[in-house]
Image (spheres, rainbow, N blue to C red):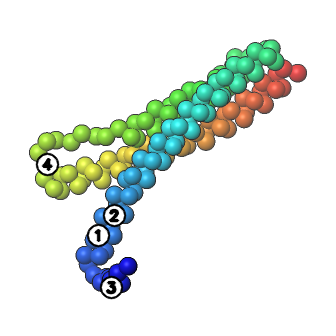
């Protein structure tokens, strides 16, 4: 084991920042992958349970109630597509200056973050709609 003394200078902070930024991109992509998996699971479970629940309870639903029961499928699908879109890269021009490449990279990260926020908001909205549709089906089957 070497007892090496670290010098904290400008190069140390430059290296630390480079590691932090490259790790942030990897963490954001890992979060998008986990969100995509969760959305796929929610979509599968909700769709099956909503169809099965409505069929088993033989609930007679009105038009707005059917729309409410079906709406989480649409919001979960939109959130899934938005999260997938966050993982897709944006291709720049072949010949770019360093400044243009940096600006494109920053814009890409900002777009990915925005898309992940939208997907997360849609997931929360879907959960609220799922709970509301469960209440509607339960009260309609009585």
Mark 2 or mark 4: which is in front?
2
Q: Are marks 2 and 1 in contact (CB under 8 Å)?
A: yes
Residue 118 in view here: no
Q: Residue at x 81, y 18 (%)?
A: 57
SS under mark 1: helix
Mark 3 or mark 1: which is in front?
3
* Cα gap from disc 2 to disc 4, whole angstroms: 24 Å
SS under mark 2: helix
Of the two numbered discs 4 and 3 on the same chain, state the one appearing first in sequence: 3
Residue 99 lies, in percent from the top left, at: 18, 56
Circle number at residue 15: 1
Of the two numbered discs 4 and 1 on the same chain, state the one appearing first in sequence: 1
Mark 4 crowdedness (10 Å alpha carbons): few <14, some 14-19, many ≥20: few
Mark 3 crowdedness (10 Å alpha carbons): few <14, some 14-19, many ≥20: few
SS under mark 4: loop
* 86 with respect to 52 (left or right): left
Which residue is denoted by mark 2 in the rendering? 19
Q: Are marks 3 and 1 in contact (CB under 8 Å)?
A: no
Mark 3 or mark 2: which is in front?
3
Q: Do the residues labelled 2 and 4 touch (CB within 8 Å)?
A: no
Q: Which residue lies furthest to the front in this view?
A: 1
Residue 82 lies, in percent from the top left, at: 45, 36
Mark 4 or mark 3: which is in front?
3
Residue 50 lies, in percent from the top left, at: 70, 23
Question: Looking at the image, which is closer to me, 25 or 60?
Answer: 25
Q: Which residue is drawn at 72% across and 35% down?
A: 131
Mark 2 crowdedness (10 Å alpha carbons): few <14, some 14-19, many ≥20: few
* 106 with respect to 45 (left or right): left
Of the two numbered discs 3 and 1 on the same chain, state the one appearing first in sequence: 3
Q: Which residue is drawn at 75% across and 30% down?
A: 134
Question: In the rendered image of this protein, does residue 105 appear above or below residue 15?
Answer: above
């Amino acid at each position: 084991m070497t007892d090496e003394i670290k010098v904290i200078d400008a190069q140390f902070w430059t290296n630390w920042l480079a590691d932090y930024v490259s790790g942030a991109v990897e963490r954001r992509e890992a979060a998008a992958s986990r969100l995509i998996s969760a959305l796929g699971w929610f979509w599968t479970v909700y769709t099956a349970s909503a169809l099965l629940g409505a069929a088993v309870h033989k609930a007679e639903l009105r038009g707005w109630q059917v729309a409410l029961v079906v709406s989480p499928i649409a919001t979960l699908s939109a959130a899934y597509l938005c999260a997938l879109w966050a993982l897709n890269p944006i291709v720049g021009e072949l010949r770019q200056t360093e400044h243009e490449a940096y600006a494109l990279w920053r814009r890409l990260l900002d777009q990915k973050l925005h898309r992940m926020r939208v997907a997360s908001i849609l997931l929360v909205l879907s959960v609220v709609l799922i709970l509301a549709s469960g209440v509607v089906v339960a009260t309609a089957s009585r």
